[in-house]
Image (spheres, helix red, strand yellow):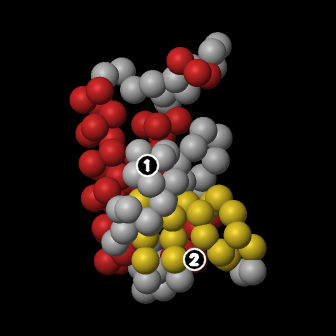
Amino acid sequence: MELSVLVGYAEGPFYFEMEGEYGNFTVEEAAAYLGLSDDLAAAVTSWDAEYQATLDQTYPPDSAFPSPEAHRIWIEKGKELAARIKQESPIVTRVDYQANSHYQDGTCVF
């Protein structure tokens, strides 16, 4: 199965087909289905929480990481997690990592 790691505010970081339905799924919804270890699920949950914490509730267009370096580190951490998902999941054949549109669809694939 193909999995996309997209990330967006107030939605799960994963996009794939589960039981005939395409959609965004939280780590909690998807971890068992994808066969992810508790350690990897916790790491993805923490990584997604970092992104969710950047939301500026008063003016969402101002949402941002505290620095360009923090954003770069978050992107790289996500890339490592995407590779781990591909290695660990017995059902995932392809991971398309997009990091909230940092990478275009299909340009960072594991």
User: For numbered disc 2, what is the local secondary structure?
Assistant: helix
Inter-mark Cα distance, 1 to 2: 22 Å
- Picture quadrant where residue 56 is located: top right
Residue 37 can be seen, yes or no:
no
State the residue in front, 108 or 84: 108
* Front residue of 103 and 24: 103
Amino acid type for the residue under numbered disc 2: Tyr
Rendering coords of residue 26 (x, y %): 60, 56
Report helix, strand or loop for mark 1: loop
Q: Residue at x 75, y 80 (%)?
A: 20
Mark identifier at residue 30: none
Q: Is residue 87 visible?
A: yes
Q: Earlier in the sequence, mark 1 or mark 2?
A: 2
Q: Report the residue marked by disc 1.
A: 99
Return the x and y of residue 88 as percentages of the image width and height: 35, 77
User: Label 1: how many residues lie within 10 Å, few (<14), some (14-19) or many (20+)?
Assistant: many
Q: Residue at x 28, y 37 (%)?
A: 72
- Give above or below for 76 relative to 62: below
Q: Which mark is residue 33?
A: 2
